[in-house]
Amino acid sequence: MEARHTDLFGSVPFGSWDTATHMYWIVRLLALTDPTSPMGAIGVNEEVLEQSVAILNEEGSAIGGVFNETMPPFDVEPPLREDDPFLDTIVSVWEPVYTTLGAQDAEALTALSERYPAFREAYEKGKVGHHLLVARSDDLPKGDAFELVAASAERYRDLGYEYLVTEATNQWTGAAFEALGGVRVHFSPFQVRSAVRKSAEPLEGVTTSPNGFLSDKDSGGMFYVIRLA
């Protein structure tokens, strides 16, 4: 807990053990910076920087943003940085979520590629964008956050991409994609089978939840695709 993470954004400790802190490190370690770059030379994630979108206030400060990337091959694991205690912790704790989303990606992308040659060709050419995460501060009304998703689609059109996909883990994101003409091609309910150990109290070294499921929502993860071209 006394370790500090150092990159171009500064040198800081991990912080409190809560969901907000975890989300902060997921964004910083896996989106804003390159998780494959070595310790001591952690660089900006140029791909995410080019494809992402932010909303600024009148003072020029970001009050909301969308993190995007090119959809990677679902059957290739990138070589993540070694000996990084922060990255190791985040990846291990959230491994059940990544496993579930990875399985959904594999099923949805395989089905789309087999049924639609145009999608398969675009995917093979790296012309399928991936909406990772949308985030907002209290200064940005929730309804206005839709503009971030719409701006992402426009950004990808400008970059010459042909499709945009996402794993919508909340219904708001799904509704945003549907409003933009997106189609749901896969649904994975949250509360069908246990994904982690059930425990009312945190357990050291084990990812748990009070009910054994990834979420207490009665919905599930939805994979959407938008045709941009």
Image (cartoon, rainbow, N blue to C red):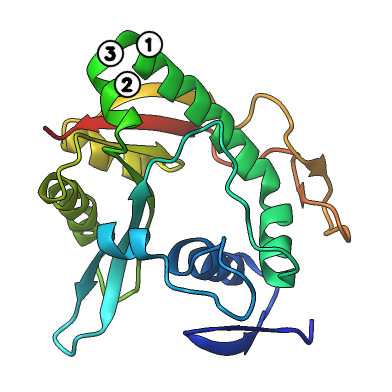
Q: CA distance from mark 3 to mark 1?
A: 6 Å
Q: Pointers 1 and 2 in contact (CB under 8 A)? A: yes
Picture residue at 42% right of the left edge, 43% below the top:
170
User: Where is residue 165, by image quadrant?
Assistant: top left
> Where does label 2 land, which residue?
120
User: The residue tagged with tag 2: helix, strand or loop?
Assistant: helix
> Where does label 3 land, which residue?
116
Q: Of the residues shown, which amino acid type is indicated by label 3?
A: Tyr
> Where does label 1 land, which residue?
114
Picture residue at 16% right of the left edge, 31% below the top:
181
Q: Residue furthest top?
A: 115
Q: Quadrant of the C terminus?
A: top left
Q: Quadrant of the N terminus?
A: bottom right
Is 90 situated left or right of 175 in this image?
A: right
Picture residue at 23% right of the left edge, 32% below the top:
226
| Percent x, y of residue 225 | 29, 30
Query: Residue 148 shows which numbered tag?
Result: none
Q: Pointers 2 and 3 in contact (CB under 8 A)? A: yes
Q: Tell me if residue 43 comes above or below residue 3 in the rendering.
A: above
* In this rendering, the label closer to the viewer, 2 or 3: 2
Q: CA distance from mark 2 to mark 3?
A: 6 Å
Q: Of the residues shown, which amino acid type is indicated by label 2?
A: Arg
User: The residue tagged with tag 3: helix, strand or loop?
Assistant: loop
Q: Tell me if residue 117 comes above or below residue 145 in the rendering.
A: above
| Mark 1 or mark 2, earlier in chain | 1
Is 99 situated left or right of 134 in this image?
A: right
